């Protein structure tokens, strides 16, 4: 019992030392402690019971001593049973208490362990918590950062979105601007094109207007010139001579004949388009203006400028050497023709037409076909005609040549600006034909009739010896028959009476004032009958010496005048011109 007691005591006295470390977490142990306290209380109660039992035991001992009876024993036994009952009760109670304590201890142990574990776990937890806290904090920080980051990101996204929207808007604006720009560009281009078109049409109109103005100015000029130079019918003639500026009589006589070639003079006076670059025609125009000035106090004019340019343009007429009117007329007609827009034409004259000079140009044309040759001629030479000069002075010659071997006839057509008749050959030809003697009874050269010259012109020559002609068919030079005829006559027919070089072939020439060439011209519709209007006569021992004068019908009164350099005098009859030697005859078609 004592042991039990001691044991209980020891058990009960077992102090419950509180672990300070646990105390901190007292709240969590409170329940345990309460239980412990209850246990302690129970132990206390037990102790108190035990004390009471001890007292009772003492009392029983004393009662036993007092009554040495069975009653005591009974009492003791009852007490004992009571005690035993109490003891068993106590034991039981103790046992339960011990069990409880054990359980409590166990619990405490486990709790301690748990506590330790908890402690450790708690420390760990603490650390972890700390870590967690830290991490939480970190996380919190991170979270905050993340949040901030997210917010920022969101903000940025928003901004980006806004930017995108703005960008899109700008893009749209730009594209709209581009479209506008395109439109503007297009409009500009259209305007430019329109402007160009307008400018072009404006320019065209301007050019047209300028052209019109020019034409009007030209017309005005022409009108002015017409008024200035046109002389009404029955007006007194304008008679102005040309001063001799150094052996220039051949030139003066030629210029006076041209000046009285009505259409030529009127063309230059009224219609000629003034062009100083066309030197000779411009100079001729100036000469004419001086020769046909209405209110002119001067009786003569010095063609100095004309002569200067003439000398420059053709060295043949340079200096003061006496020259031939024929050369000058030939040169002037050709030069005027070229300066007025014509082309060079291969001309042929009766005197040197032995060889077919344009044969090279013919090519594949069948020369034996007359109409084909004529077509070829017109097709190829048409453009060369179209000048006032060609219109006034050019006619067409036709040549025929027949090979004496194969008898093939070749045809050819040529331009001529004058006909030249060698008077001596004419007389010789006529004598050979038995139509006149070579010399007259008094030893002179027979007179030549102008028609005889045309007869001579149409003669058939036998081309032999060095004059043999090339035959394409025989492919060699052969004796041939050759003839020239006037295919068509010009408006102004110039006839040169060639008196030979050196010694002049002296003979009278009967030239009619009216020349009818019906028997000598092929095409009769254009010009057949001619009227004489000017003559150049040569006075002197040879063609290269002496003096040239011109007899001309005045353009205004149509009367004959002798133009002898500076002096102009009226003459009565054309036959008078035979006082000298008629050299060049000017006929106009009527
Ligand atoms: Zn032949």
Image (spheres, rainbow, N blue to C red):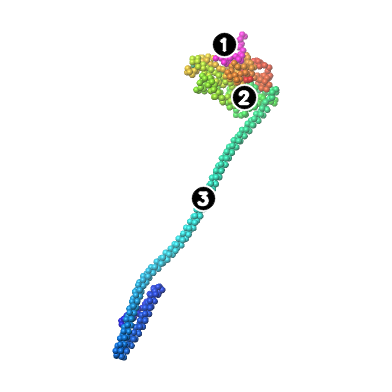
Q: Quadrant of residue 495?
A: top right
Start-end of magenta stretch: 431-460
CA gap between label 1 and label 3 equals 111 Å
Write the residue at 33% across / 81% down: 89
Quarter of the image for the N terminus: give it. bottom left
| Residue situated furthest top in the rendering | 441
Q: Please say whether residue 446 is one of the residues in the magenta stretch.
A: yes
Answer left or right for 583 relative to 158.
right
Q: Which residue is mark 1?
A: 433
Write the residue at 47% across / 58% down: 153
Q: Is mark 3 within 8 Å of ligand 1?
A: no
Q: Position of residue 533 (x, y in %)?
A: 64, 19
Q: Nearer the viewer, residue 177 or 230?
A: 177
CA gap between label 1 and label 2 equals 45 Å
Q: Position of residue 511 (x, y in %)?
A: 63, 15
Q: Please say whether residue 288 is one of the residues in the magenta stretch.
A: no
Label 3 near label 1: C-beta < 8 Å? Answer: no
Q: Which residue is mark 2?
A: 307
Write the residue at 64% across / 27% down: 270
Q: Position of residue 328 (x, y in %)?
A: 60, 22
Q: Which mark is residue 171?
A: 3
């Amino acid at each position: 019992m004592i042991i039990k007691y001691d044991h209980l005591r020891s058990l009960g006295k077992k102090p419950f030392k509180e672990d300070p470390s646990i105390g901190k977490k007292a709240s969590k142990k409170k329940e345990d402690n309460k239980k412990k306290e209850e246990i302690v209380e129970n132990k206390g109660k037990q102790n108190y019971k035990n004390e009471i039992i001890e007292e009772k035991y003492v009392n029983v001992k004393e009662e036993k001593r007092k009554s040495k009876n069975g009653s005591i024993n009974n009492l003791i036994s009852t007490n004992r049973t009571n005690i035993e009952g109490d003891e068993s009760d106590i034991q039981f109670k103790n046992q339960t208490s011990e069990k409880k304590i054990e359980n409590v201890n166990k619990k405490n142990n486990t709790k301690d362990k748990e506590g330790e574990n908890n402690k450790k776990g708690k420390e760990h937890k603490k650390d972890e918590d700390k870590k967690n806290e830290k991490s939480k904090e970190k996380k919190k920080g991170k979270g905050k950062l993340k949040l901030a980051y997210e917010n920022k990101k969101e903000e940025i996204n928003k901004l980006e979105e806004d930017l995108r929207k703005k960008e899109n808007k700008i893009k749209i604006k730009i594209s709209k601007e581009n479209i506008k720009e395109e439109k503007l560009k297009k409009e500009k281009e259209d305007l430019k094109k329109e402007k160009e078109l307008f400018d072009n049409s404006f320019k065209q109109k301007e050019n047209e207007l300028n052209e019109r103005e020019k034409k009007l100015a030209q017309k005005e000029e022409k009108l002015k010139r017409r008024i200035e130079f046109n002389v009404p019918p029955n007006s007194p003639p304008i008679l102005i001579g040309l001063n001799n500026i150094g052996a220039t009589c051949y030139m003066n006589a030629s210029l006076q004949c041209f000046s009285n070639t009505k259409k030529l003079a009127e063309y230059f006076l009224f219609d000629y388009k003034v062009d100083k670059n066309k030197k000779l025609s411009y100079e001729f125009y100036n000469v004419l203006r001086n020769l046909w000035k209405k209110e002119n106090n001067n009786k003569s004019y010095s063609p100095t400028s004309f002569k200067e340019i003439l000398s420059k343009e053709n060295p043949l007429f340079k200096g003061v050497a006496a020259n031939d009117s024929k050369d000058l007329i030939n040169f002037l007609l050709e030069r005027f023709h070229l300066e007025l827009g014509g082309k060079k034409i291969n001309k042929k004259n009766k005197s040197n037409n032995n060889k077919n000079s344009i044969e090279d140009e013919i090519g594949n044309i069948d020369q034996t076909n007359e109409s084909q040759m004529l077509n070829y001629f017109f097709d190829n030479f048409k453009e060369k005609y179209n000048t006032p000069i060609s219109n006034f002075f050019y006619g067409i010659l036709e040549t025929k040549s027949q090979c004496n071997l194969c008898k093939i006839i070749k045809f050819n057509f040529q331009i001529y600006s004058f006909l030249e008749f060698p008077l001596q050959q004419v007389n010789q030809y006529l004598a050979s034909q038995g139509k006149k003697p070579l010399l007259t009874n008094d030893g002179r050269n027979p007179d030549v009739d102008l028609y005889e010259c045309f007869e001579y012109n149409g003669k058939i020559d036998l081309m032999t010896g060095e004059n043999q002609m090339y035959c394409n068919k025989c492919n060699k030079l052969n004796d041939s028959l050759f003839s020239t005829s006037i295919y068509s006559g010009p408006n102004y027919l110039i006839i040169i009476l060639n008196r030979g070089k050196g010694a002049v072939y002296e003979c009278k020439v009967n030239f009619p004032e009216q020349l009818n060439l019906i028997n000598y011209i092929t095409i009769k519709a254009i010009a057949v009958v001619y009227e004489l209007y000017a003559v150049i006569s040569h006075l002197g021992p040879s063609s290269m010496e002496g003096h040239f004068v011109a007899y001309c019908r005045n353009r205004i009164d149509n009367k004959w005048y002798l133009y002898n350099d500076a002096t102009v005098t009226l003459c009565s009859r054309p036959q008078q011109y035979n006082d000298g030697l008629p050299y060049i005859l000017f006929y106009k078609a009527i």
